Amino acid sequence: MDTVNRLLHAAREALDMGQSDVAKATGVSTRTLHRIENRQGLVGFEILENLRGYFKERGVALIETGDARKWALVFSRELAPLPDQTQKNRIYDPVPGRVLKAARVLSGLSQAELGALANFGHTTIRLLEKSDNGSTPERRYVLQTYLEKAGVEFVKPHGEQGWSLRLAS
């Protein structure tokens, strides 16, 4: 359940929503959302399913992978666009800012902590998470590398599925 709670928190952050926004829209109290995100106490499956449905409608689905105990966040292509397929000899597909933000939240790192690891200022991290324009693929690659070391697995879009994140085993 710990992984599901962390993924729900990451989904809310990726959508740039506060707990009070989600509470109003879903009827789940902010206290309950706080408990979920901080992994305090037991939360009902009905509430978790309500939140999953709400986030899925907004483009971030919490899905069960092949292993019954492994969960992942999957982003819609509208929310986290596919890499530019027109570039030839591409070495790296830059991760969209929204996906980087969710990965950082999933890893449990603050912007300042990730910035310190990557030798970037926290404002640089904030800007990379907010916009996919104006940042170099190299900076995104550096962040992705540190987030992978922190236990987050990035899965590139394939078929109809967009970018996805999961906690590494």
Image: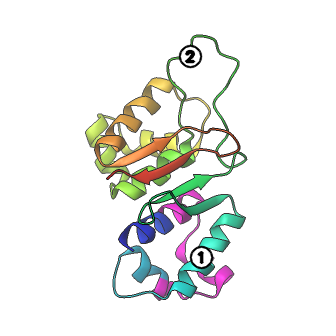
**Is 122 situated above or below 54?**
above
Q: Which mark is residue 51?
A: 1
Residue 21 falls within the magenta-colored stretch: yes
Dominant secondary-structure state across the stretch colored magenta: helix
Residue 121 image position (x, y, % from top left): 35, 39
Residue 75 image position (x, y, % from top left): 62, 52
Q: Identify the secondary structure beneath mark 1.
A: helix
Residue named by callout 2: 90
Residue 147 image position (x, y, % from top left): 36, 44
Q: Residue at x 44, y 24 (%)?
A: 138
The answer to whether one can see residue 20 in this image is: no
The answer to whether one can see residue 111 in this image is: yes
Residue 165 image position (x, y, % from top left): 48, 50
Q: Quadrant of residue 88?
A: top right
Q: Earlier in the sequence, mark 2 or mark 1?
A: 1
Q: Residue at x 39, y 66 (%)?
A: 3
Magenta stretch? 10-32
Quadrant (top left/top right/bottom left/bottom right) for the N terminus: bottom left
Q: Residue at x 55, y 65 (%)?
A: 12
Q: Quadrant of residue 96?
A: top right
Report, in whole angstroms, how far the alpha carbon at label 2 lies from the one at label 1.
37 Å
Q: Closest to the observer: 105 or 130?
A: 105
Q: Which residue is drawn at 53% across and 75% down?
A: 19
Q: Identify the secondary structure beneath mark 2.
A: loop
Q: Closest to the observer: 66 or 27?
A: 66
Type of the residue with mark 1: Leu
**Is 42 situated above or below 2?**
below
Q: How many marks?
A: 2
